[in-house]
Image (cartoon, rainbow, N blue to C red):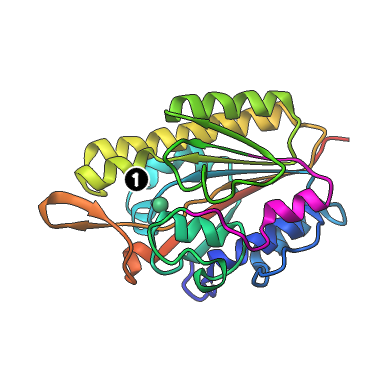
Amino acid sequence: MSEDIKRQSIENICASLSYAMGIDVCKCAEAPSDLLCRYIDEVFGREKSDRVFMFNPDAIAEWIYKKYPELFKEVEMRCELHLPLNAVMPSVTPVCFGTMYTGASPDVHGIKAYVKPVITIDTLFDALIRAGKRAAIVADSASSLAKIYLERDMDYFVYDTVEEVNAKAAELILRDEHDLIVVYNKNYDSTMHRVGPEGIEALAEIKANSRTFGMFSDMIAKHWKDHNTLVGFAMDHGCHEIDGGAGSHGLDMEEDMHIVHLYKAYKAEK
Ligand SMILES: [Zn+2]
């Protein structure tokens, strides 16, 4: 990644996804990402995407992505666009995912610390529902994504384990009923906090995220051939090592703030 590409923010993702799907942007969203919109236009031309699949692994930092490229092989070979982004402060999960799907700063969406209330401002999910589209979130029961977007007329699939989350996500791909599917995987974050960002067990969870994303991508390429689809490998924030070999995040430092999303657009086969 060239540093002369202006680093945008996860605030710019929400409007980009609205742009991809050709729906009105939700009310508080910041501008879309030029890079992501240009890529969408390059692939779809004048058409829009009728499916968006967002895979949200937690806490994978850009520095980890750069230092361990072999762990991301399954993602790299299936994505085309690299989007360097800043997280928002404090760089913790509910704050950042609150921004990703509202396009709004923490001051505007209201989650400014590690708390998980239901967001009451307009969200990407509300905009989708107004456009007559169906959205689903698939996440584990303790996670921010299972909580902060509740109380909408959409589908929530909440389970205790990442394995169940991913099995349901695979089922939803085969069912092909949702216009937007958001899938959350906690396993790198929860392991990294315990053994550090570069602990062997933590790095193994990145490999698991990468393989899972590869499997979803292959399923989408095979089963959604008649859809224009945008697929994202989209983390919330990064992480850094702290004393005792453990891991943490939440600070305004490059390790926690710099992330890189990867995207691939699949044009329908006509
Ligand atoms: Zn997180």
Q: Quarter-wise, where is residue 6 in the image? A: bottom right
Q: Is residue 179 left or right of residue 262?
A: right
Q: Which residue is mark 1?
A: 189
Q: Residue at x 49, y 54 (%)?
A: 117
* Three-letter code, disc 1: Asp
Range covered by the magenta-colored residues: 117-136
Q: Quarter-wise, where is residue 217 in the image? A: top right
Q: Residue at x 42, y 47 (%)?
A: 58
241 drawn magenta: no
From the image, which quarter does the C terminus lie in? top right
Q: Residue at x 80, y 44 (%)?
A: 133
Secondary structure of residue under mark 1: helix
Give how far across and how far down residue 24 sits, in percent: 80, 62
- 210 or 165, nearer to the observer: 165
With respect to residue 249, does 187 lie above or below?
above
Q: Label 1 CB, ligand 1: below 8 Å?
A: yes
Q: Is residue 57 left or right of residue 245?
A: right
